Amino acid sequence: MAVVIIGGGQGGFQTAASLRAEGYQERITLIGDEPGVPYQRPPLSKGFLLGKQEQRHAELRPAAFYEMQRITLVKGRVAAIDRASRRVALDSGDHIQYDTLVLATGARNRQLSHEGVAYENVLYLRTLGEAAEIRQRLEAANDVVVIGGGFIGLEVAAAARTLSKQVTVIEAQERLMARVVAPVVSEYFRIEHEAKGVDVLLNATLRGIGEKEVLLGERTRRPADLVIAGIGVVPNVELAIEAGLPAGNGITVDKYLRTPDERIYAIGDCAECPSLFAETCVRLESVQNAVDQATCVAKAIVGHSAPYAAVPWFWTDQYDIHLQMAGLPAGFDHVVTRGNPETRKFSVFYFRGERLCAVDSVNRPADHLAARKLIGARTALNPDQAMDEDFDLKTALN
Ligand code: FAD
């Protein structure tokens, strides 16, 4: 018996660690194409850019952990999966045999295709190496342009502004984080960023990038020593497809996170699976999703298979604002707000028909914790209760 995991990121690491925690005794090989030991990405766009956290703070475990747990870390890129002979081929020409294979290949940044993107001042943020380069280049930069007003872009903008850079955020949509939060939350973050001095340009079309500027619309330009693009990711599905496995917006898995090949699972950013909390299959990009799916697969491998059922949650930190999201708001038809955005502490409750489907909490961690339980238990909570700050959310669980 042997488990091989492709991808030494959050999900790959967690699969290996959970397998040992579940008592799995056989060989575990974790293959990753990044240098060093597995690390977590959230600090890269937050404390690491500010110089408050170092590489060692991002590392999930020290090297000794892998030795102690008998987890073999292999550095290299898997080039192919041979399902018939159950082995993977590495770029180096080596082959590794598996009984069970876990694909945790993550995602890569979507690239800009505009004129000027080859300038060396255009950077992306996914890896520790890229974060280190941005951190170093920020030191000398004065004008920073962030392309994309999603989580990563806004976290980078907040860090750059905290470091006293002149920051412009260019967002093509009419509001920030439009894909994931309600207008009230987008508006709150626009106001906060602008109050800090960030120039937030909405409905803004990028025309091209010059050596020291970005070009927008007809005549508008912004100076830019550094351009950081955060325009979403593309899941790493090619390896699975080449091995004959199905993939859409992610490697297709069932509710047990298994591909149609019963020896192969896929988890984390690269996988698309049915969700109890959405009407369609979803591919989520979050630490919680990677960790909980890894744990679910580790249990399945040791014989305790169960459908994946964890409540999705996510967070982002921008300045001193901690936004926590629980559930999936897709398809919501109305929202109510608990608390007042002007106090910098409020939560937005999303309803799909009668059902509470998601809650975004700004600096209200207790609401977030209650929300995860309420959504998981499919509790009936009505909008009036949600809005009423005197109503204790925990009582709805009883
Ligand atoms: P990854 O962690 O990306 O790991 C995949 C690994 O597989 C990579 O190392 C990749 O190089 C490797 N790989 C791919 N193909 C191969 C191959 N063929 N052979 C060998 N190795 C391969 N989530 C949150 O919940 N909260 C946050 O605040 C947050 N902040 C973030 C900040 C940043 C800057 C980024 C980039 C992400 C952030 N995320 C956050 C998202 C979260 O980090 C990801 O959802 C999570 O890392 C997904 O884990 P994963 O294992 O699926 O993929």
Image: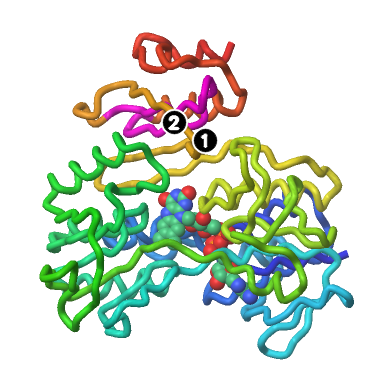
Q: Give the tally of numbered discs.
A: 2
Q: Residue at x 32, y 56 (%)?
A: 47
| Residue 327 badge | 1
Q: Are marks 1 and 2 in contact (CB under 8 Å)?
A: yes
Q: Which mark is residue 359?
A: 2
- Residue 112 horizontal side relative to residue 166, left or right: right
Q: Secondary structure at mark 1?
A: strand
Q: Position of residue 206 (x, y in %)?
A: 25, 68
**What residue is rendered at 41% in x and 17% in y?**
386
What's the amino acid at mark 2?
A: Val
Seen at 22% across and 73% down, the residue is 226
Q: Which quarter of the rendering shows the N terminus?
A: bottom right
Residue 92 shows up from this direction: yes
Identify residue type, mark 1. Answer: Gly
Query: Residue 10, labelled with which disc?
Result: none
- The crowd level at tag 1 (other Cα within 10 Å; few <14, some 14-19, many 20+) is many
